[in-house]
Image: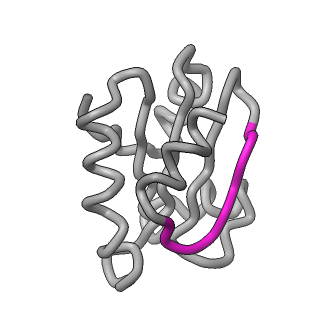
Amino acid sequence: MSIQIVNKENFDSIKASAKPVLLDFYADWCGPCRMLSPVIDEIAAENPQYLVGKINVDKEPELAQKFKVMTIPTLVIIKNGAVVHQSAGARPKADILALLQG
């Protein structure tokens, strides 16, 4: 499955997904975000059971503020419309998958 670009217009439909949702808050200028991006792309491509979205904090400051994102990258996992996990910093692929499955 492809990555969804998340913005304030489509956020509610993304959040309401029946699938577990992985959101990656990032910025184009952020080095750790650029390192994490291929991992997020792999997870999206290899795991159609998840909805994977990316939120550019520079273009969507309202969403970053809503999630109290202070550091990027920040990963948020949503299940059944509720945030079940939020963490800042790059993580290994196995850790991200474990959080999605847990």
Position of residue 42 measured from the top left corner of the image (x, y, whole percent): 26, 47
- Look at the image and tell me in which quarter the N terminus lies: top left
Q: State the image quarter where residue 45 is shown.
A: top left
Position of residue 31 measured from the top left corner of the image (x, y, whole percent): 35, 85
The tally of labels here is: 0
Question: Residue at the location (57% across, 57% down)?
Answer: 75
Question: Residue at the location (25% across, 60% down)?
Answer: 38
- Horizontal side of 27 relative to 70 (left or right) equals left
Q: State the image quarter where residue 59 is shown.
A: bottom left
Q: How is the image coloured?
A: one colour
Question: Residue at the location (35% across, 53% down)?
Answer: 40
- Look at the image and tell me in which quarter the C terminus lies: top right
Quick one: 23 or 85, which is closer to the camera?
85
Position of residue 25 measured from the top left corner of the image (x, y, whole percent): 50, 61
Question: Residue at the location (43% across, 30% down)?
Answer: 51
Quick one: 74 or 95, which is closer to the camera?
95
- Horizontal side of 80 relative to 76 (left or right) equals right
Q: Is residue 27 above or below residue 4?
A: below
Q: Is residue 28 above or below residue 77?
A: below
Q: State the image quarter where residue 101 is shown.
A: top right
Position of residue 69 measured from the top left corner of the image (x, y, whole percent): 66, 68
Q: Is residue 4 above or below residue 47?
A: below
Main SS category, magenta section? strand
| Residue range of the region highlighted in magenta in the rendering | 83-91
Q: Is residue 56 above or below residue 63?
A: below
Quick one: 17 or 39, which is closer to the camera?
39
Residue 32 on the magenta span: no
